Amino acid sequence: MDNLLGLLRIRIKRGIDLAIRDFKSSDPYVVVAMGDQTLKTRIIDKELNPVWEEDLTLPVENPELPIKLMVFDHDIFTKDDEMGDAQFSIKPFYNVVKSIDTVPNGTVLKTIKPDRNNCLSEESCVTFKDGKVVQGMTLRLQNVECGEVELELHWIELPK
């Protein structure tokens, strides 16, 4: 990790209207991958609108790498079922982090609109909040009939 630029903290907030993969529900968890790094949340039993409020932290060497988010239904006796996936770029977020100086709390620094190249279900704002650059986003899951995941990005500078 010679070229470490900083740490990306991804707060997995909640799932919205996730797909049913068991009898009437699912036992969802989220896997986040960037390059060869993989992290996952805890499993929430029998819930299609799970609230994780869980922080996953990735060391970032290359902000060009996309982040893949995959949702799975935990099964005990069989392979876990896929419940959709999404991908997003941290490059717009990282570029704002690197160019930021002092701005008033609550300032919207950049707005990212949903398009074919991202999985955003609505506009995503990069904001300066309590001395930190934060980006909230809701991702529409692909390769599944329904579901979204709400998350928030925080950048952590490394001590010089």
Image (cartoon, grey):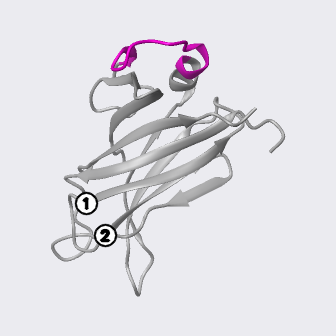
Q: Quadrant of residue 67?
A: top right
Q: Amino acid at mark 2?
A: Ile
Quarter-of-image position of residue 101: top right
Q: Is residue 64 left or right of residue 110?
A: right
Under circle 1, the secondary element is: loop
The reply, left or right, for residue 76 in relation to residue 9 is left
**Which residues are drawn in magenta?**
96-112
The percent coordinates of residue 43 (x first, y second) are: 37, 70
> Farthest residue in the right direction?
2
Q: Could you tell me which residue is drawn at 47 percent across and 39 percent down?
A: 87
Q: Residue at x 52, y 31 (%)?
A: 89
Residue placed most toward the observer, 66 or 100: 100
Q: Which residue is mark 2?
A: 44
Tags 2 and 1 in contact by the CB under 8 Å rule? yes
77 vs 37: above or below: below
Quick one: 49 or 73, which is closer to the camera? 49
Please give the residue where the numbered disc 1 appears in the rendered image: 50
